Image: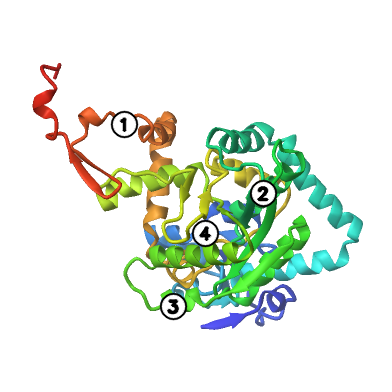
Amino acid sequence: MREISAAELLEGQSRPEGGSPCIIDIRDEEEYRRGSLPGARNIPAGRFEEDYESCCEELKGYSPVWLLCHTGSGSRALAQRLCLSGLDAGVIEGGWRSYLVRQLEALSSEESPEALTEKRLRAEKSLIKKYRKEIWSQFTKAVRDYQLIQEGDRVACCISGGKDSFLLAKLLQELQKHGPVSFDLIFLTMNPGYNEENWRMIRHNAELLGIPLTVFETQVFDAVAVIEKNPCYLCARMRRGYLYNNARLLGCNKIALGHHYDDVIETILMGMLYAGKIETMLPKLHSQHFEGMELIRPLYLVRESAVKAWRDYNGLHFIQCACRFTENTASYGAQKESKRAEVKKLIARLAEKEPVIEANIFRSVENINLRTVMAWWKDGKSYSFLDDYDLQGTVSD
């Protein structure tokens, strides 16, 4: 099985004598539409899993067949399988991410400071104008209704590098400029062990969007790499602890995370299906281990589709979850995906038939009737419907 860089491939160095090479992008269709290598065709990894023989037949006559995934690792197993089936297959080193980072850096180096400023202003203006209803109004409603930011707060906006945290950073910047209360704002970024390309992408976007990062480093990814059972839970707990601690050292009393509406409803359903409990991701909560610190979620009412629309309208590209578990198992071409990804797909399928389902999941934790609940917990104490059952009198069944 051969490997080639995207640069070598596009320069024509891969063409054998008399061969007819092709590039097959095995990422999801949505990712392919947002960008791919010139001339690449899309055959998602799922299609190979569902109808491998048909896909092989489609690729006959091409030599070599270069596979493109997100990181370069998710396509290796498939390329080896294609080779065993008699095809001349190889992988593109570093995948789409490597190519994209280099393209964005090259583009930025060629553009004038005025052009880069114009891009930033366009991204800011679109939040207030084009996406006022879907993003700005929902953001300010959450801040107001859940009392997330008060006069004199010092907020650490936590930048993970994804689309949600960068959007949150821009919204908080705008709120600080034009909002009704005065508060301090720090953009806190932890490097938990990102690979170089992801870290370059984060720094590129911060510069492009005008976000001054305050950076500290940890080795969280190394620590959880050997954990087989539920590594995402441990990773999230460790990262949050580091964020709380560093935010407090900087004099902050709040950390702001980029969880949105879809994260909330996915968490509700995950709790029911996998943990046997009903709970939600609250818009704010006090830290149990860092006295005086509070976590807030200003994107609580913003839909993920709106976040993606803002990103695509402004031609922005952000990293995905960049931990090794995600890149090795949940990324393109892998056999296993996270439980959250499974629940996300389940909700999407249900919502296709009944669009109200998403809102009903969200409202389900606002409309709990304790008279119809078997048992519940509060402040470490358990309660049961039997506690005052005999005192209720006759009620309708």
Q: Looking at numbered disc 1 in the image, what kind of residue is underneath it?
A: Ile
Q: Secondary structure at mark 4?
A: loop
Q: Residues within 10 Å of mark 3 (few under 14, many from 20)?
A: some
Q: Residues within 10 Å of mark 2 (few under 14, many from 20)?
A: some
Residue 368 tag number: 1
Between label 4 and label 3, give the one nearer the viewer. Answer: 3
Per the model, the C-alpha gap separating discs 2 and 1 is 36 Å
Q: Residues within 10 Å of mark 4 (few under 14, many from 20)?
A: some
Towards the viewer: 235 or 60: 235
Q: Position of residue 46 (x, y in %)?
A: 43, 58
Name the residue: 72% across, 52% down.
Answer: 315
Residue 107 can be seen, yes or no: yes
**Quadrant in the picture for residue 130:** top right
Between label 2 and label 3, give the one nearer the viewer. Answer: 3
Q: Position of residue 248 (x, y in %)?
A: 57, 62
Identify the residue under disc 2.
311
| Position of 91 relative to 368 (above/below) | below
Towards the viewer: 212 or 134: 212
User: In screen coordinates, is 54 left or right of 214?
Assistant: left
Q: How many numbered discs sit on the rendered protein? A: 4
Identify the residue under disc 4.
43
Identify the residue under disc 3.
223
User: In screen coordinates, is 334 left or right of 375?
Assistant: right
